[in-house]
Image (cartoon, helix red, strand yellow):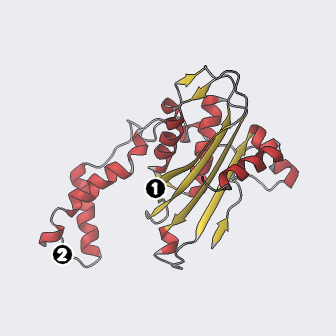
Amino acid sequence: MDTLIKTLRANKPETKPSEATARAAELDPAEFLAAAVRADRPRPSRAEAEAAVYTLLNYIGEDPTREGLVDTPRRVVEAYDELYQGYHQCPAEVLDRTFGETAGYDDFVLIRDIEFTSQCEHHMMPFYGKAHIAYTPVERVVGLSKLARLTDIFARRLQTQEHLTAQIAAAIDEVLKPRGVAVMIEAEHTCMSVRGVAKHGAVTFTSRFTGMFRDNPAEQSRFLSMVRSPQR
């Protein structure tokens, strides 16, 4: 079962369809240009974080002192350090280095099937899938691995799929200033597949288009066709 979610729009009063498609949603640059952790924001100590896990183990009815759980609080905090490392990384720095030797290349660059895992901000449960990213460069291009790295930075934060899609597109659009950006994400959410309605295999699609991809339906169609074409 596939679920289609429309392109994310800003929280503004309803507008006519023609107006909605004429402008991109607005995001605070702090959401996609800088690391999310501020030095002036107080954070609990590691010991306090481990104590919180100890409390949760007690809450579910476990005995945190039994052999199999003695080191669990430490392991959980270490896992959080890895799963949420995106809070400490700067998206703009990843896209900062570009290359000008393109021989006049003027078509879009597409990287598809970028695998990622993120965490739902509503239940702190994983959602995972693939991102497909295209942009049409102006004179200079960014290293291909940087787009995968950018995806991981945003994915390794508490997220919604809609917000993740919008942040990736906004960062590329702002830093590289291409003629257009297209982002599509397809993912399965464990907060839907293993709890609640428990619908395993349901896939959610989100997309975001800027510039020529937003304004030219033919370019949108070509992007979608290339994303959906079978691999050789």
Secondary structure at numbered mark 1: strand
Pointer 1 residue: 117
Quadrant containing the N terminus is bottom right
Pointer 2 residue: 63
Q: In this view, does 176 lie to the left or right of 152?
A: right
- Can you tell which of label 1 and label 2 is closer to the viewer? 1
Name above or below for residue 223 compared with residue 194: above
Q: Is residue 154 left or right of residue 77?
A: right
Residue 176: percent from left, percent from top: 62, 29
Disc sitting over residue 90 in the figure = none
**Residue at coordinates 75% horizontally, 38% vertically from top-left?**
211
Of callouts 1 and 2, which one flags the residue occurring earlier in the amino acid sequence?
Answer: 2
Name above or below for residue 47 compared with residue 122: above
Residue 165: percent from left, percent from top: 60, 50
Specify the amino acid type for callout 1. Thr
Does the image show residue 4? yes
Give the crowd class for mark 2: few <14, some 14-19, many >=20 residues within 10 Å: some
Name above or below for residue 207 compared with residue 180: below
Q: State the image quarter where residue 204 is shown.
A: bottom right
Specify the amino acid type for callout 2. Asp
Residue 96: percent from left, percent from top: 52, 26
Residue 183: percent from left, percent from top: 64, 47
**Residue at coordinates 44% horizontally, 49% vertically from top-left?**
156
Front residue of this view, candidates 108 and 10: 108
Secondary structure at numbered mark 2: loop
Name above or below for residue 97 compared with residue 213: above
Label 1 and label 2: CA atoms lie apart by 30 Å
